[in-house]
Amino acid sequence: MNPANLGQCHRRRGSRDERVEVKEEVEARVTAGGQGEETRVGGSLGDLSCQPAGVSCQPAGVSCQPAGLSYCPDNQFHHQADLPHHQADLPHHQADLPHHQADLPHHQADLPHHQADLPHHQADLPHHQADLPHHQADLTYQGEKDEAHFHKPQTSHRTMPRRPISARNKRGRSGSWSGVTESEDELEKMAQALGQAPPKIKVTMANHGGGSNYGSIASSVSSIGHCNHLDDSTTTDTTTGLFNSEITADTMRRRLKFFFMNPKEKWHARRRFPWKLLLQVIKIIVVTVQLCLFAEQRFNHVNYLWDTKISFSHLFIKNWDTSREIQVYPPAGGPLAVYKQSEFFAFLDYAITTYANIQEDAIGMYEYEYQNGSIVPPFFCTTSYISGEAFFGNNTYFLNNNTTTSCINITLSEVTPGWSTKTFLENNNFTLNFDLLLSATFNFVLKTIKLRVILPYETPECYRMTNKMTFNNYERDGQMVVELQVGARLLNCDGSVHVTSNSDAVSVWRTVINVVTIAICVTSLTMCIRAIYRAQLLKKSTIQFFHRHYNRELSFEEKLEFVNLWYVLICINDILIIIGSFLKIGLETKLLRTNHPEFVKSSAQLSYEGYLDTWNICSLFLGLGNLLVWFGCLRYLGFFATYNVLILTLKKCIPNVLRFSICLLMVFAGYALCGWLVLGPYHLKFKSFSSTMECLYSLINGDDMFATFSSTSGKDPVVWWFSRIYLYTFISLFIYVILSLFIAIIMDAYETIKNYYDDGFPESDLMKFVNECTEEPTSGVFHDDGERTIHDIINSFFCCDLHRSRQQDGEYEALLT
């Protein structure tokens, strides 16, 4: 401290009011001490009158002490011991003298302001003197409890031995009188002038209400009354507003560093329990159990309808073979078809006769549908061209492309053991012209009850089965393909089932799982949306901060750092699972099934009968939701360096893989279109564009190569040679070149990530700014925002908040004693 400026009251920015309070308290103590008991200090540091007069600063001998400061004979020995050190420091003080002289005009210019403030301080002096007895009483009580308080004066003599200057810690100096940046010598002189023990310097921990205090003197002044600790404005956020225009760089760094912490670090930083992590773990367990139950339930339902269709095929289709019930590759046989008119009528006679005697012949429980007390009759329909004829003599024809549909009901009472469909049609003047026929259908309806109980999945259900036996002649190639189409519709079905007592409990647990799943997903969705929203607020605050302090904008990549795609993924799977859970409840209560068509799988490639049934939609939502839930587990594995390599490698290589895939798609599309056109008529795998792409993709993975070569027809030598060249070039190009390049791109990304682990990851300007915050999560400085989050509310109900109460008791930790 420059003695010439002892009374100038230089203050550090951001702590003026607090240091004025300390000065006033010191003046009050000096005044009270001068009136009540004798002290060996005259003027009390120049009475802190903020006047340069009376303080001489001469280079010779450096006689810098306040006027009136008395000499203590008892300390003569210590002064003589310190004399060599003061003489050694003399050249440094002489070198600093020009700078102090240059600063003198500025201090003299400030003198009128300090003199103007002096009456106010003198007016406050009686109040401080009146409060002194109370503070002294509190000081006695707090003396043993708080190390940071000044002890009550016991003697006016120096009792603390002086250490040599060379053995003392040097501290930075800024000309402040408050004791924040003075050297230890100056602090001891001030304490000796007051007749008290030297203060102990404390660095405060994070306040419970927010704000971190650095370099403050933890004295009794700060513990009595309502005086706050001295703050360093460069590290303390004086407000809690997110968009505060006066937010400091260190506060912004702490906020950003806390934002990029993982749950474990956040726990150490603020004792913030990772509730989202715990919720995701519970959600994974619950939704997986829900999916397993629904998968078993759906399999039983779909399998029942498929088995019913197989039963109808055996009952109503003549010469049905069990090999047609299993889809194999290559197919075991050709399509089921009729080629003669006699075969066509034989198939119809067989189906109509079986339907008329279904209750006597069938093993299953089937019944006719009744309407107004009578059986709903089956009916036979044909679709054909209106007119057309061919003249083979002169190779001419004419055709009316319009079609017409005709139907006739078949009365079951007329069906006898010698039933003939051809005779029935002739007797009813129903014309059947095979030259113009496009299709013929036999339609009938049956009702059945599924008397089966599989708890907790199934209970008895009533179905209305609509059946259509189709003879397809649209190709007009002399082959009429025979197929049976079955549709199912759930009916209202009342009844009672006598089951074991634990069945009700199982049903209740199934409902509980659905409700708990919805509740967990709604909570998870709310927390993640809130986290995404707060991240955008922090991004906006960061953008404003960089624009105001550094006059630059964040790059697009830096802005993406505030978009947590894992949270977006969690939000998507939560929405899917919530919708799927509501659909599942509707299925189990049959609210969404009654009188709605249900899908029955078919041997045909595509079947649109009831394909949008609730079972398929519900399974789609629950399946995709669980897929994304398990994908989300990679986020938590990413907290470990070993597992994080996979995620970082994928993240690094995806841009290059996508660019490479665009080029690859051009080549693949060319091969697919060419193979479909040339080889489609001669090869089973190339009969459609979709099957062609599936075949080529399988060849890339080495699947069924020899069968693909050998299945090509050899009748046409041009097609045969083309197929060989086509397949050889495709396999060589994609397996040996393109696939290897794919692997090289991924390996290059993997090696880059490994080098990053060894040499350090590249940092953007934003991350460089954040990494300047060197405080560890356990340092306690991340409580400075003073915000009350949902984590704090939850933690207040558990033991997690005990740390904060304990932290308040030991708020100050000694740095220099």
Image (cartoon, grey):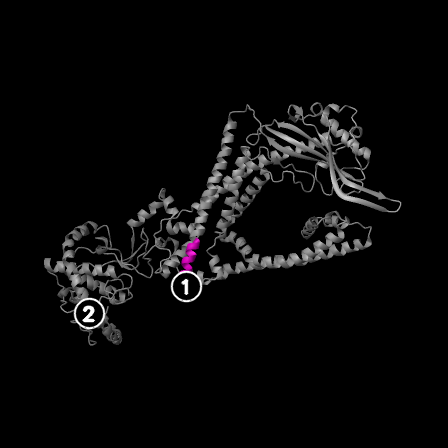
Q: Residue at x 38, y 48 (%)?
A: 789
Q: CA distance from mark 2 to mark 1?
A: 39 Å
Among the 4 quarters of the image, the one containing residue 126: bottom left
Relative side of 690 to 180, left or right = right
Q: Is residue 265 visible?
A: yes
Q: Residues within 10 Å of mark 2 (few under 14, many from 20)?
A: few
Identity, as a three-letter code, of the amino acid under mark 2: Pro
Q: Quadrant of the C terminus?
A: bottom left
Q: Residues within 10 Å of mark 1 (few under 14, many from 20)?
A: few
Identity, as a three-letter code, of the amino acid under mark 1: His
Among the 4 quarters of the image, the one containing residue 197: bottom left
Disc assigned to residue 547: 1
Asked if 365 appears above or below 814 in the picture, the reply is above
Asked if 206 appears above or below 552 in the picture, the reply is above
Q: Residue at the far right: name it.
A: 393
Magenta span: chief secondary structure: helix
The residue that label 2 is drawn on is 112
